[in-house]
Image (spheres, grey):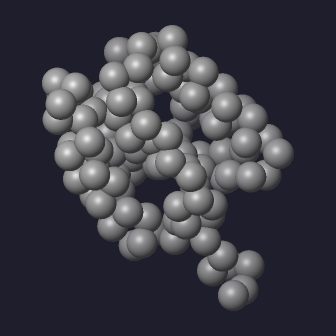
Amino acid sequence: MSKKNKKLMCAVYLSVDVPEKEIQDKEEKQFRYIKDYCKGNGLKIVKSYHRAGLSRCEMQKHFVELARQIEVDELQAVVIANSRYISCGVYDLYMKVGRIAAAGGKVYSVDEGLLELPIQ
């Protein structure tokens, strides 16, 4: 495969806001939704992370780990279903996307496309 057509290695971040007994079913649906997006956009899923009812603090730790993996070239991108599932507001979203961008990676949202920081 040529460098131009090489797929980006990505991690999927699954996060749903449902009662605990419904998490597995909703995450499976979300994974299929994200998987279809990846297939059509040149992204290869190599890892997945599950929020699964964890606190926002634990989610921050996940994003620190994702950024570390991008820095050491294990990953190149993170794919989510929608930004509202990973953030509690604009500031929080900028922090997460900024952390990944600073590490050299990209954040894709199935519903919103490539999440970018306009700051260079």
Instruction: State the residue in front, 34 or 83.
Output: 34
Instruction: State the residue in front, 78 or 102.
Output: 78
Q: Is residue 45 above or below residue 63?
A: below
Q: Is residue 77 left or right of residue 92?
A: right
Q: Is residue 115 left or right of residue 118?
A: left
Q: Is residue 119 above or below residue 3?
A: above
Give me the residue at 42% from left, 72% from top: 39
Residue 86 position, x and y percent, is: 39, 28
Instruction: State the residue in front, 17 or 105.
Output: 17
Is residue 58 visible to the viewer in this orientation of the structure? Answer: yes
Give me the residue at 53% from left, 61% from top: 45
Residue 105 position, x and y percent, is: 66, 45
Give me the residue at 56% from left, 52% from top: 47
* Quadrant position of residue 17: top left
- Which quadrant, please, contains the C terminus? top right
Residue 71 position, x and y percent, is: 79, 41
- Which quadrant, please, contains the N terminus? bottom right
* Quadrant position of residue 37: bottom left
